[in-house]
Image (spheres, rainbow, N blue to C red):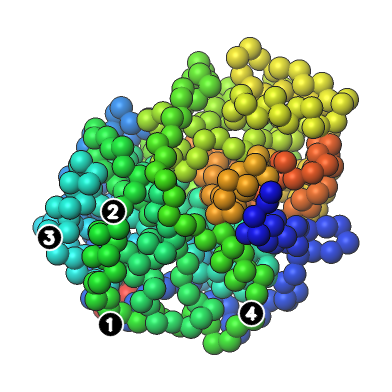
Amino acid sequence: MKSEAVSRIIEYHEATKHHYDRFAKSLGYMDWANQPEPFRTFEGAPAVHLPLLANDPDAAHADLYSRKNNPERPFTVENIAGFLELSMGLSAWKSIPGSRWALRINPSSGNLHPTEAYLALPGSEGIDSGVYHYNPFLHALEKRAETPADLWDKIRGHFGCAGFLAGLTSIYWREAWKYGERAFRYCNHDAGHALACLSISANLFGWKVLYLNAISDRDAESMIGCDRAVCEKNEKEHPDMLCYVFPSSENTEKRDIPPEIVEEFARLEFSGVPNRLSGEYHPWKAIDRAGETSEKPRTAPEVLSLGDGLSLVAETADSRLSAPAIIRQRRSAQGFDGRGAIAGKQFFSMLARTVPKKDEAPFDAEISPARLHLLIFVHNVSGLNPGLYFFSRNREDFETIRPLCRPEFLWRPVRENFPLYLLQEGNYRAEAAKVSCYQDIAGDSAFSLAMIARFKDWLERGAYNYKSLFWESGMIGQILYLEAEAHGLRGTGIGCYFDDTVHRMLGLSDNTFQSLYHFTVGKPLLDRRLKTLPPYYHLEYARGS
């Protein structure tokens, strides 16, 4: 029997579907006067201004994921600064006459950035032990609380290795301002993007990010101090996840934080007042209910076994770009040249990267086993006929979804020992654009896709899995972003799509599987009107020097 929480989160999901005759509820116009400030800062909290990387880590394309070539670095202020710069920092500024805006390393729906990052650090030369908020505009850590040294002795003793804590939160209003009720979905996409960014950046410094899957949202909130931040109700930060960051050479079986350590964090005195983001607000009760319904309780710790990535490593396409260069130049394309193609080797390599594999970033953060699969509209991939394809990211779900789909589908394997199947041949450019809210970027690309999640079963294990399903979609999206850049292309995440139209296209008649995120990759059309400025050209002014 479904719990009340599961029923409510399914109601939210159904109510926020887009349909041809109606979209999910939003204002329907842009309330520019109340557009949220893009950066949160804690006024009155002392700021530790971080150094920018003098030299990027010497890492190749494959080292984004593989751990074997990335030497372990100490937890110095310089390395922690570099870790943040290559995960949650700025990547560039764009400007046109009369307007300027920042781009960031971590992708976000509409460039609205609901995700905030926090670190709890044991202290080292140049930085005190404490809980900090990361301010990407200043590239600074704002100290919110001081932690005693003996607390870190207990943390090291619990995990069996040295490390620090990293937390992510969401400000739902930032997305709801533009997208209305559907914004809760997008905030969780973005949390997944951010987690992948943290995991991949940490890997370049020889560290590993591990999701602490046993702790509750309330515990995470208490440990980073969000429950003691005095701000407008609509601007509240909601806890997404708390992770432990430690050397890749170490290992830990722990996925929790003991209650007595949580209590010590709860007793800390936090300082700093969060800046106000908007003058006025439109309340979205559906989002508030979804957040409350999907709140994660304390659960039993679970150590995930990710396996061998379906042994898809036989053929990889490497890039001439370094790993940091790929990270820094990631952008969302605004339009595509319909003639742009991707080589078959690159396409297969890109798909293989999306499959979780033991000891490879970002999925060894252990959010979950693979629960999402890819319905792919192949438009222009060398060696593949245009058509509709299905990529299965785990073996178990394949046997479940196939009989639920249209009986006329071919399910023809494209190559041996690779779970990509041709469903139907044909030109699907128009259909791809149509199901993605008539957006040309889905049809003009080399390929586009819908991420199809094993939905009902995971929700019945706990309504809080609703959020983590979207986190997984964001992690897949971040890999597709990076892989597109690595191969001279560009990607774009698509949150606007006609949910049930995608399901009907597959032949799905219930919510066993649901589409959660769309993505498209192709040859970008560049807007020559835009001027690009370096990410931290403003720092001399911002830091008052």
The quadrant the C terminus occupies is bottom left
Can I make out residue 427 in this image?
yes
For discs 1 and 2, the disc positioned in front in the rendered view? 2
| Circle 3 residues within 10 Å: few <14, some 14–19, many ≥20 | few
Residue type (three-letter) at the residue carrying disc 4: Pro
Residue 72 image-quadrant placement: top left
Residue type (three-letter) at the residue carrying disc 2: Pro
Spatial separation of the CA atoms under disc 4 and disc 1: 29 Å
Q: Which residue is mark 3?
A: 149
Q: Which residue is mark 1?
A: 44
Spatial separation of the CA atoms under disc 3 and disc 4: 42 Å
Say which label, 2 or 3, has the lower sequence index: 3
For the point 75% across and 45% down, the residue is 511
Spatial separation of the CA atoms under disc 2 and disc 3: 17 Å
For the point 88% across and 25% down, the residue is 408
Give coordinates of residue 378: x percent, y percent. Answer: 73, 32
Position of 37 relative to 296 (above/below)? below
| Circle 4 residues within 10 Å: few <14, some 14–19, many ≥20 | some
Q: Which residue is mark 4?
A: 283
Say which label, 3 or 1, has the lower sequence index: 1
